[in-house]
């Protein structure tokens, strides 16, 4: 097996082209990510996942997806029900903490059933961002709530539900996207809050769940820490905040490099992300020219980054033996529409 490179890549369609197969074999990304454009039906997804793993010669290569519920949900009926967004779990939690946390665990456990049968092993969940009033709707109802306590409690339950079903969680967007007044898909936001406010509000859920195996960065500038660079390319944010203040020593993955928040060409983006101390460069849109640019400056996975990657993949020691029908029936007691 060729040494893996420090990157996760997407693909263009529902099966790999000859060009993609040749590229992935030569460049050997550590993992892959799926989007709606890659998904039609069960056997097609399984075949695509098998193709990806075959290209890199690794049957256990991680396959990522964003399956939150609400508007960010790549698997749709009939592959999976339309699940509620994080905000619906938060509303339930505000009325009854135990019910909210149980529903969050059940929903994540259902995600694990849905994903693992397709060969998908990593879900980019939980969303630990804590929005403030007036912030961009890019987070919006994806958030569990507007106070750190609910976000922490429901994020913890969601992560535990995924892991109980054998799927790894990725908490996002560290160290917090909730104050961003711009959508990072299109522009770079700057947060001007004081460090003490960030510590109390934005960083708190990540600090409480810093033991989780993986996290995804925010393409957000925190002026109180580094006014010149977003977290994804800021060595100061990575070292002082993510690794230091928050205490996260798991695998750190960039948010999507094809988003417009990051400036520069794709080789420069990849180099800046790795130089900042982020372990893995993520590129999602499957555009070959862009992926080639990322690969040109992405190094082999080694040292502490390799240790974190191996630790992440071995984080789940044992899956539960839950019955899917029973879990769905219990979840329906909270959300009848997705029975």
Image (spheres, rainbow, N blue to C red):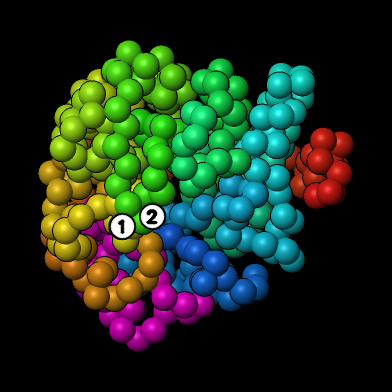
Q: Position of residue 121 (x, y in %)?
A: 51, 52
The relative height of residue 231 versus residue 77 in the rendered view (above or below) is above
Q: Residue 185 carries which label?
A: 2
Residue shown at the point (65%, 49%) measured from the top left: 70
Q: Give the range drawn in magenta.
A: 1-29
Position of 330 relative to 70 (above/below): above
Q: Residue 148 versus residue 75: which sits nearer the camera?
A: 148
Q: Mark 1 points at which residue?
A: 260
- Counting every numbered tag in the picture gives 2
* Lower sequence index among marks 1 and 2: 2
Query: For this view, does 269 lie left or right of residue 214?
Result: left
Q: Does the magenta stretch include residue 69?
A: no
Disc 1/disc 2 C-alpha distance (Å): 5 Å
Residue 130 location (% of width, % of height): 49, 29
Residue 92: % across, % down: 74, 28
Could you tell me which residue is drawn at 39 percent across and 45 percent down? 182
Residue 13 lies within the magenta run: yes
């Amino acid at each position: 097996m060729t040494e893996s490179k420090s990157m996760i890549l997407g693909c263009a369609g529902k099966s790999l082209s000859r060009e993609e197969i040749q590229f992935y074999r030569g460049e050997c990304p550590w993992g892959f990510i799926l989007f709606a454009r890659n998904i039609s039906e069960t056997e097609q997804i399984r075949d695509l996942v098998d193709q990806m793993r075959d290209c890199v010669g690794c049957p256990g290569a991680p396959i990522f997806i964003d399956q939150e519920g609400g508007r960010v949900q790549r698997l749709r009926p009939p592959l999976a029900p339309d699940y509620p967004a994080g905000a619906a779990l938060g509303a339930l939690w505000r009325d009854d903490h135990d019910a909210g946390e149980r529903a969050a665990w059940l929903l994540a456990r259902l995600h694990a059933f849905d994903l693992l049968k397709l060969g998908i092993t990593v879900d980019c969940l939980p969303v630990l961002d804590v929005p403030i009033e007036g912030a961009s709707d890019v987070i919006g109802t994806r958030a569990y709530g507007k106070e750190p306590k609910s976000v922490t409690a429901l994020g913890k339950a969601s992560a535990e539900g995924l892991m109980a079903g054998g799927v790894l969680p990725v908490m996002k967007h560290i160290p917090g996207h909730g104050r961003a007044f711009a959508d990072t898909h299109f522009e770079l936001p700057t947060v001007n809050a004081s460090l003490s406010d960030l510590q109390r509000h934005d960083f708190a859920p990540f600090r409480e769940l810093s033991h989780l195996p993986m996290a995804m960065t925010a393409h957000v500038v925190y002026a109180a820490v580094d006014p010149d660079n977003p977290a994804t390319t800021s060595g100061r944010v990575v070292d002082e905040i993510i690794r230091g203040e928050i205490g996260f020593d798991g695998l750190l993955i960039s948010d999507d490099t094809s988003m417009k928040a990051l400036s520069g060409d794709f080789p420069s983006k990849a180099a800046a992300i790795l130089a900042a101390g982020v372990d893995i460069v993520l590129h999602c849109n499957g555009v070959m020219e862009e992926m080639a640019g990322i690969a040109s400056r992405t190094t082999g996975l080694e040292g502490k980054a390799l240790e974190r990657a191996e630790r992440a993949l071995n984080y789940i020691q044992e899956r539960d033996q839950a019955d899917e029908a029973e879990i769905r029936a219990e979840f329906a007691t909270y959300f009848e529409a997705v029975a």
